[in-house]
Amino acid sequence: MQLDLFDGQANRILSRADYAGFAGELAGSGCRRCPLSDSRTRIVVDRGNPEAKVMVIGEGPGENEDIQGKAFVGRAGKLFDTIMASVGLDSNRDMLIANVVKCRPPGNRAPLDEEVEACSPFLRRQIELVRPRVIILLGATALKRMDPSKKSFSMEEEAGRFISLPAYPGIDFLVLYHPAALLYNSRLKPAMWSHVKELRKFLDAAG
């Protein structure tokens, strides 16, 4: 956890030792660390179980998430729930779902560097408090934001791979297609099915 000497509000949030306290304080903070605060309806912290051994990181809230204040509840989120249920995983019970940024980017565009940087301490703190065994990275934005060494890559090559990141020892990362991509390209579905079956095998082996 890294505190900001010039942001007392963020420091109070980051200093919370319990996840529920952290999430509640962040959600109600009215954070204005970046311009996304100007157009958001709600700060979207997460959805799911903070005690789960699987954490999921997506790109950012969309319209439905912004309205409801919960992560991944739109069309892509519902598809993700269905995909995970197909291998016996309940997204609300077996996972904690978060995003690279906590506020909706205008027009659902990808978050900008300065927006990601402003929000990154909160995501890092989530990971510290949840202490997941596996983190699923959904899509290219999540992958390149969590692994800055990824400057140019193809999701076709990265999806389905388990990777390790030096900044997060003891955690295995699995790269998956973002479910939104499957909504627009059904040809990705067989690969996604294969990848989530490997996730199931990994979790079963890990106990």
Image (cartoon, rainbow, N blue to C red):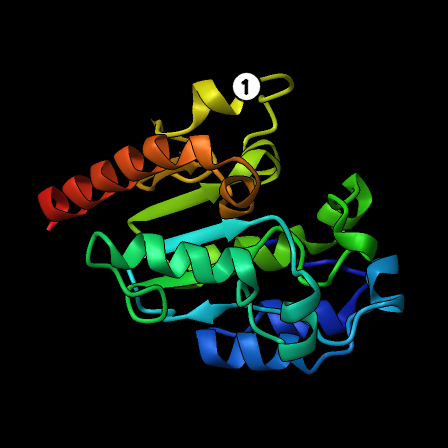
- Is residue 198 in view from this perspective? yes
Q: Nearer the viewer, residue 131 or 53?
A: 53
Q: For the point 28% across and 65% down, which residue is it?
A: 90
* Tag count: 1
The picture places residue 174, in percent across and down from the top left corner, at: 37, 37
Residue that appears at 65% across and 54% down: 60
Q: Is residue 154 left or right of residue 163?
A: right
Residue 18 location (% of width, % of height)? 44, 76
Q: Can residue 125 be seen in this snapshot?
A: no
Badge 1 amino acid: Ser
Q: Which class describes the residues within 10 Å of circle 1: few (<14), some (14-19), or many (20+)? A: few
Query: Picture quarter containing residue 121?
Result: bottom right
Q: Is residue 98 left or right of residue 162?
A: right
Relative to 65, residue 196 above or below: above
> Dot 1 lies on which element?
loop
Q: Is residue 87 above or below residue 93?
A: above
Q: Quadrant of the N terminus?
A: bottom right
**Residue at x 33%, y 42% (from the top left corner):** 171
Which residue is more in the foreground, 37 or 26? 37
The single residue placed furthest to the front in the displayed view is 186
The location of residue 206, given as percent across then percent down, is 14, 45
What residue appears at the point 64 percent right and 19 percent down from the top-left corner?
151
Q: Report which residue position mark 1 lands on.
A: 154
Image position of 161 (left or right of 202): right
Left or right of 105 in this view: 124: left
Residue 14, percent across and down? 60, 67
Where is 19 relative to 3, above or below?
Answer: below
